[in-house]
Image (tube, rainbow, N blue to C red):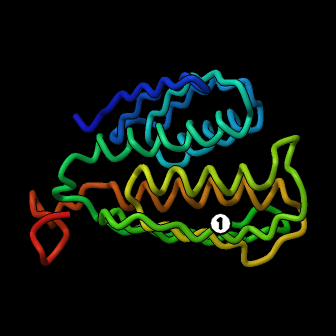
Amino acid sequence: MREASVNRKTTETNVKVKVNLDGEGKGEANTGIRFLDHMLKTLSKHSLIDISVSAEGDLEHHLIEDVGLTLGEAILKALGNKEGVFRFGNSLVPMDDALVSVSLDCGGRPHAKVDLKLEGDVEGVNKQDIIHFFVSFANAARINLHVNAVYGENDHHKVEAAFKALAIALRKAVEVDPRRGREIPSVKGGL
């Protein structure tokens, strides 16, 4: 089973995450930040990865960052040596006025470029914290992640489209390729 549980406890936060890459998209999130909970459930639903997150912390910034780090670490742990996976994923998702592109590579070279063109905070969440979630997630999961708002007027729609696009790209990347067998998707023989 490609599952993992990760607990991250610091003087600032206490975060618990469980994932099942071969799940059904069952999402549970209790972070105390309603918009973040909604985005985590959206990520679970559209990736078909079962995700359970419980978190508490001192500051919203620390909580959002540490949820991103812990979720990324859980995804990395569940992927194991990445044998047989597609490795790459991309998606272009519309939501009303917004169109967002996500491309990613689970190849172990962490990098994040996030350009959502946010004009303000979203549902009470600082726009920098939203961007920082994606960066923290990518770094901990050791994923090369590119998130780009092609266009959009409503910041909520841009962020929600980004989480949906991440979900679909992640689903593709972690899916087991039946043609690959147990082979690791790299000419180097390891990731």
At 61% across and 42% down in the image, what residue appears? 65
Query: Residue 47 at what x, y percent from top left?
Result: 49, 48
Q: Is residue 179 left or right of residue 7?
A: left
Q: Residues within 10 Å of mark 1 (few under 14, many from 20)?
A: many
Q: Nearer the viewer, residue 14 or 106?
A: 14
Q: Quadrant of residue 68?
A: top right
- Name the image quarter holding the N terminus: top left
Above or below, comparing residue 107 to residue 27 in the picture: below
Q: Residue 110 or 23: which is nearer the viewer?
A: 110
Determine whether 60 is above or below 177 in the image: above
> x and y percent of residue 187 in the render?
13, 78
**Left/right of residue 190 with respect to residue 139 in the rendered view:** left
Q: Is residue 163 left or right of residue 68?
A: right
Tell me the amino acid under the disc marked 1.
Answer: Val
Label 1 sits on a secondary structure element that is strand
What number of labels is visible?
Answer: 1
- Taking the spot 42% from the left edge, 28% from the top edge, the residue there is 18
Q: Which residue appears at 28% of the width and 65% of the height?
A: 86
Q: Is residue 167 above or below residue 10?
A: below
Q: Which residue lies under the disc numbered 1?
A: 93
Q: Quadrant of residue 179?
A: bottom left
Question: Residue at the location (65% across, 39% down)?
Answer: 64
